[in-house]
Image (tube, helix red, strand yellow):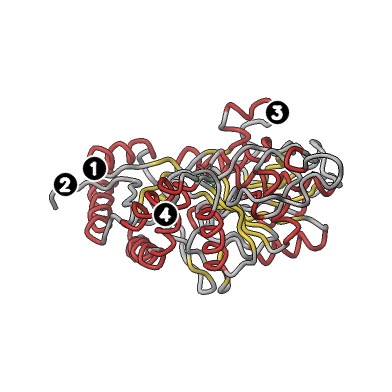
Amino acid sequence: MSKMTVPFGTISIPPRARTLINEALDAKRVSCGRFVRQFEQGFAELLGVPHAVAVATGTDADALALALLHDYGATPESEVIIPSLSFVATGNAVLHARLTPKFVDIDRKTLNIDVSRIEEAVTERTKAIMPVHLMGKPAEMDTIMDIAARHGLTVVEDAAEAHGMLYKGRPAGSIGHLGAFSLYVAHIISTIEGGVITCRSEEHAEILISLRSHGRACSCPSCVLSTTQTYCPKRFKDGQDIRFTFPRVGYSCKMNELEAAVGLANIDAYEDIVNTRYANLKYVLDRFDRFAPFLSTISEEPWEKIGPHAIPVVVNEAASFTRDELAAYLEQNGVETRTLFASMPTQCPGFAYLGHRPGEFPVAEYMGKNGLHIGCHHDLGIAEMEYFLHLLEKFLTARQS
Ligand SMILES: Cc1ncc(COP(=O)(O)O)c(C=O)c1O
């Protein structure tokens, strides 16, 4: 088989985005406005949820979904339960929200939070659980929602990697109380950089809109979206300008019109993007058993559809080679790789001040050293997936014989 290039993430911007970008530029209104609102409505519709609030990044989406807990009595000591393995943004977001992360190890089979360990992590300070659907593989949401209901906790799905995922027929972001998506280029619906929070409660949506704009009091759509300059009768009603009243500590993370234009065009292309990516992912997953016991990946259960974000590969104990050797071989042969992130509390130096010790999260730490992932995005096809499998076969034949 001749050498191919299998990049991790590319983005083809649909032609409609260019038309919409020009429209926004011609209208001379390029900050959060009409297109952002249309994007929010389109995204909410896609998931069948009542509200979506667009922000500047997926990390902001996680952080704001958690920061709203301060409206309900949370303090910096309040705890949020998260898996110890995720992209570092999950842990950063808890800290950005002025809350305390409580890490729980992951399940080796699913790469998601080990639900059998959540309850022992709950304390009187726990306010929320933020499971991550890592690599689009659904976290065990029924168990998580049961635990949350028993302890009165809010559930925020970190659905950054879970566009196109279904759990018992329900899309990511529609199962917990809130869902947080990244719209970064490597993700399925992209705005280039961006994030969006989904929620069922109108009150939550209003708090999120306030939080993304400095914690402002003003929540009427006309002011929020700067779509009009008309007189607002509410503005000076209480003796001060509500546009410059800030009842909560906020953030500055609005999405702009140019990003929303790209997002709108990607919503139009959503079905095609998901179908292509899913076909790539399934092609590899269905043919992966032959690499046992040396390599493994995730599998799809009958009640779920994995969101086709990327393809994880774990180098198991039986292998006589390291993850880094395998990654180097793939890279030399044109396949871009990423690691499978790290155990945030024990393998990310930025979290060292929290005082965790190596060995506390053995499964996450194993994945941090022995996992990688490759792309299955929509600019790739079955030929690239076949090439990747061929390389694994060749590598294993050379290294394990
Ligand atoms: C699980 C997870 N959470 C959060 C994020 C943060 O998203 P962003 O890069 O848009 O800030 C990412 C990014 O890829 C992610 O993978």
Mark 2 element type: loop
Q: Residue at x 53, y 57 (%)?
A: 109
Q: Nearer the viewer, mark 3 or mark 1?
A: 1
Q: Nearer the viewer, mark 4 or mark 3?
A: 3
Q: Quadrant of residue 119?
A: bottom right
Q: Which residue is most to the front?
A: 231
On residue 355, which mark appears?
3
The foreground one among 221 and 123 is: 221
The foreground one among 76 and 111 is: 76
Compared with residue 291, is residue 320 higher up or lower down, i.e. above or below? above
Residue topped by disc 4: 296
Query: How far apart are labels 2 and 4 at the CA level?
Result: 24 Å
Badges 2 and 1: C-beta atoms under 8 Å apart? yes
Q: Measuring from the top left, give residue 94's x and y in whole percent.
A: 68, 40
Please tell me which of labels 4 and 3 falls first in the chain. Answer: 4
What type is the residue that disc 1 sits on? Gly
On residue 141, which mark appears?
none
What type is the residue that disc 4 sits on? Ser
Residue 45 shows up from this direction: yes
Please tell me which of labels 2 and 3 falls first in the chain. Answer: 2
On residue 334, which mark appears?
1
Compared with residue 298, is residue 237 higher up or lower down, i.e. above or below? above
Mark 1 element type: loop
The foreground one among 395 and 3 is: 3
Mark 4 element type: strand
Please tell me which of labels 3 and 1 falls first in the chain. Answer: 1
Residue topped by disc 2: 3
Residue 316 shows up from this direction: no
Mark 3 element type: loop
What type is the residue that disc 2 sits on? Lys
Please tell me which of labels 2 and 4 falls first in the chain. Answer: 2
Query: How far apart are labels 4 and 1 at the CA level?
Result: 21 Å
